[in-house]
Amino acid sequence: MKNTKRVLLVFPGLDVRIDEGARHRLNSFIDSYAKAGYRVSVLAFVKGAAWPFGVVEKRKLDKRADWILFPYILPISRNRFLTWLLVSYVKVILGAVSRLRRYDIIQSEILGIFFGLCRRKGTVMVTDFHGDLYSEVVAMKNMDRRNWFVKWMLDAQALSIKDSDHCICVSENLKDQLEANTGMKMGDYTVISCGVDFVRFSEAPVADTGIDLKDRIVLGYCGGLQKWQNIESIISLFRMLQEMDRRVFLMIYTNSPTDGIRDLLDGLGKENFAVLPLKFSQVPSHLKLLDAGFLLREDLVLNKVSSPTKICEYLAAGVPLVCTRYSGDYARSVGHGREGFVLNGLEPSQSEAENLMAFLHKVKADREFYAGICRESASGRTFYSEFERLKILKQ
């Protein structure tokens, strides 16, 4: 074990109670580094409300890694002093941890502004950019670009690029956007998109929900109901399709409260939809009930540079994707009219909806063919196949 290489993954803001994309990406890195022969440690700063739970449930965290847990004392806030305090807190702890043991790689999630006290010869500093926080703050928080917090976020991106020996981006679009934001050029970088555990999704048995779906065209959505998921647009599009073919059925898999959309759902007719909460282990089997899955994103920078995990999860389950042209890096895996149908925006025209319905009829008529080409497309985008492109592994 003396010559075993070590990697420290730094994850600020972990909530161990929630299954979400960033945590799945963390687990994928744990698995991939372990397969590559690294001893993996995770320095995680657990969010306040989840902190006691995180300590008690540490045994449920990924056992392929050694976990070092600290409380995430504050969220990154719009208060200058509190933001400085949080960054200093993470930086000091990371510096101390990195001096207790030598790591060959220290990799930070989303921002690399914490490396200042831990740089040492022989250690490669890596930032994993899986989103554009600057664009997200401007678009989702509706904040003025002159606001100090927006400027701080932009400076944090620039510092992350500057202080990193290597950068990871989920897409080429994200790399280009980060360079445009900061006016800085990335040196060494690798694109590692949000791939899929192909075997888990492709080989899962089909779920039995007890719902009679025979002869129905089952359209579905799987995920949270945050505003940016555009669930209302999904329901609106479903209503357009429903007017063309009464066989369509809407399946929503979510653990989020549905009170805000209950009236819209009831308007579809209680016999035409179902809402099911799922455990992580149940997702692959339930996706297989769908004839097509929705992933609708609006025209925002943060969407266009993303790599949604759901793209490859739908495809690996054999399910064509219905998305907009702003749905991240869909074009890597989805050909219009083959593995899915690409809409021009959130409000399709009548003719566009009719073309989508015609595509869905083709899928329903030759379900196995479309399931096969979807799975074939997803098979080339496992997370580990993406990870193997990481340039620092070859240095």
Image: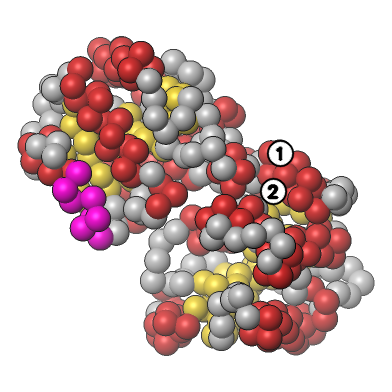
Amino acid marked by disc 1: Glu
Looking at the image, residue 190 lies above or below residue 341: below
Q: Give the quadrant of the N terminus.
A: bottom right
Q: Is residue 170 left or right of residue 189?
A: left
Q: Is residue 371 left or right of residue 383?
A: left
For mark 1, give the secondary structure.
helix
* Residue plotted at (69% across, 58% down): 145
* Residue plotted at (79% across, 73% down): 115
Q: Disc number at residue 104?
A: none
* Residue plotted at (86% across, 51% down): 184
Q: Is residue 356 visible?
A: no
Q: Is residue 56 visible?
A: yes
261 drawn magenta:
yes
Looking at the image, residue 295 lies above or below residue 343: below
Task: Looking at the picture, tell me which residue is in the foreground, 277 or 237.
Answer: 237
x and y percentages locating residue 154 in the rendered image: 74, 61
Task: Looking at the picture, tell me which residue is in the foreground, 17 or 152.
Answer: 152
Disc 1 target residue: 172
Residue extending furthest toward the right: 121
| Label 1 environment density (alpha carbons within 10 Å; few <14, some 14–19, many ≥20) | some
Q: Main secondary structure of the magenta part?
A: helix
* Residue plotted at (39% across, 30% down): 347
Disc 2 target residue: 169
Amino acid marked by disc 2: Cys
Q: On the image, which quarter does residue 30 sit in?
A: bottom right
x and y percentages locating residue 206 in the rendered image: 24, 37
Q: On the image, which quarter does residue 323 sit in?
A: top left
Looking at the image, residue 7 lies above or below residue 316: below
Q: Which residues are magenta?
A: 257-264
x and y percentages locating residue 44 in the rendered image: 58, 75
Looking at the image, residue 198 lies above or below residue 282: above
Distance from Cα at disc 2 to Cα at disc 1? 7 Å
